[in-house]
Image (cartoon, helix red, strand yellow):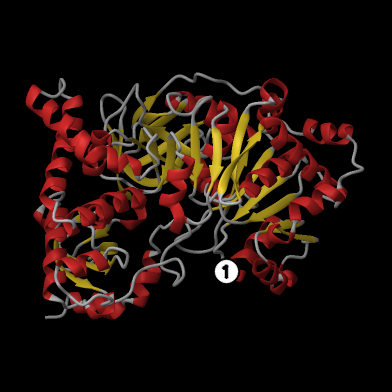
Amino acid sequence: MREFSVPATTEVGPDEAVPDLLAANVADHGDEVGLRVQRDGGWADVTWREFGDQVAGVAKGLIASGIEAGDRVALQARTRYEWTVLDFAIWTAGAVVVPVYETSSPDQVAWILSDSGATGIVVERPEHAAAVESVRDQAPDLRSVWVIEDGAVAALTAAGADVADSELAARRATLRADSLATLIYTSGTTGRPKGCELTHGNFLFEIGNGMGLLDRYLAPGGSVLLFIPLAHVLARVLEVGAVKTRTVIGHTPDVSNLVDDLGAFRPTFVLAVPRVFEKVFNQAKAKAEAGGKGKIFDRAAAVAIAWSRAQDTGGPGLGLRLQHALFERLVYGKLRAALGGRCGGAISGGAPLGERLGHFFRGIGVTVYEGYGLTETTAAASVNHDGALRIGTVGRPLPGVSAAIADDGEILVRGGIVMRGYWHNEQATAEAIDADGWFHTGDLGDIDSDGFLRITGRKKEILVTAGGKNVAPAVLEDRLRAHRLVSQCIVVGDQRPYIGALITLDEEALPAWLESKGKPAGTKAADLTEDPDVQAEIETAVADANKAVSKAEAIKRFRVLGGDFTEANGMLTPSLKLKRSVVLKEHDAEVEALYAR
């Protein structure tokens, strides 16, 4: 078994807990701006003292409402300021936060409430409350439902007006590093989600050893705009980490206004999934082509990539430096403006970004640091950073974390970031965490001699063709999704004579593409599945993806589908992972058509 570890830079004391971070900021930096909140069309500053007072008021309200230390309290909302207030208030009251995706179905909400034994839930909208009421009979422990848009924060604050500060202090004193902080239910591509038990110590170990790696951005004077769901562990860790590092936090719940919000908030750092970076690139390319400047953009992109690659091989020569300086004035500054103009770095997680895009963004002045982790590892188990950056990998293990590759290629992780276990599921816990403390991730990968980790696929998703060739679909799928017209795809071929793919079109990219081809505006994806120009575009994408694999692993046939894979139709999880079994069942006929003679 190959293993690589990095010594810890921070240890967690037995009596430490997450609310201590906020208490320290209030006591020592109370007048500093800690957050900014959208109000009246602008961004209003909130000091650490103001935020701390709000958190304390809501925490007292929870206590007055009957929430006991150790109770589970669910939280269902989009990424907004109130989420962070409630997150810290629930912790300050000595309780456990159970995040629920805003888009979860009533059946999913019922499962989480019943399995966690939640005694209360805060939801964003009246519709969420109605959905909770419709499944209340399945959640026997549930007593209270609060609605953010109906004034939950103010109502809780008023309810707790008579709760003494000493009682709040007593609740905080019940928390230790080994206390349960949150139950995060894995979105689950198959079966019922499992509740991952993450402790206060897990969070503090993760951010204590991880945030220092990105201290060029996550520090006083820096700012981060959160827009991916805070129900996702990676966004949550960045939220807590920003409190520790006193990085100003902003929230935006509506990604349809993301460009405007980035321009107004002007973060120094962002967190996003690869699809966001793909869209920034593809939309910029489409805009350039529409303005007759497609060749200039392509050249600028090639120079950015070459300039980035040269950073790892002795630095760019004079000619490349001059070209890079030219495109800095013509192109790169405009691209950075789409991220607010001040953003110099970003974290990409949830899926591979791809080496080409990684070099492109570093080349334009926004280094995207890829990392790797799971809910079970409190987000990042490894990450690239300025001191150890290798684009195309997911970095080295965090300080205090060990990563290993088992004999069958599975990635194993050990350290203070690994969850306590699965809630009320000893069998699943024993299957995931072995006697030596190694968490078995289910992912396949490799560690090079310098300790950099590469992800090659999912252990349970390996396809075995009729000829006996093992194929990791993620390698092909990630490259296909990088094409501007591709939204989602699934690679198939298990026990089949060759590899095939089902591909969906990106509705957001279609208008510009239709205009560039002189096709009628408003043409839908469903009308383009057999279009010769679409077929030619996808053939190009497939040919590019096939460069990453051997001939035996290459895609031989594909079909373009008329509809997308989405969370709404049940084919993607809330964290945008493909539910392979659902997609294959729904599109069985299309798969069979790939192999029809």
Relative to 232, residue 345 above or below: above
| Front residue of this view, candidates 42 and 219 | 42
Task: Residue under label 1, please give it.
Answer: 105
Q: Which residue is drawn at 74% across and 44% down?
A: 95
Q: How many marks?
A: 1
Which quadrant: the C terminus?
A: bottom left
Q: Residue at x 87, y 33 (%)?
A: 165
Query: In the rendering, at what x and y percent does residue 397 appear?
Result: 40, 29
| Front residue of this view, candidates 382 and 544 | 544
Q: Quadrant of residue 527?
A: bottom left
Query: In the rendering, at what x and y percent does residue 580 appear?
Result: 36, 65
* Res 563 seen here: yes
| Front residue of this view, candidates 45 and 305 | 45
Relative to 329, residue 78 above or below: below
* Res 433 seen here: no
| Front residue of this view, candidates 396 and 297 | 297
Whether residue 70 sits left or right of residue 306 in the image: it is right
Q: Residue at x 50, y 18 (%)?
A: 9
Which quadrant: the N terminus?
A: top left
Q: Residue furthest left?
A: 319
- Secondary-structure class at tag 1: loop
Whether residue 187 sits left or right of residue 411 in the image: it is right
Query: In the rendering, at what x and y percent does residue 568 appear?
Result: 46, 70
Query: In the rendering, at what x and y percent does residue 398 appear?
Result: 44, 28
Q: How crowded is the residue under tag 1: few (<14 C-alpha within 10 Å), some, or many (20+)? A: few
Whether residue 300 sits left or right of residue 45 in the image: it is left
* Amino acid type at image mark 1: Ser
Q: Which residue is drawn at 23% across and 63% down?
A: 485
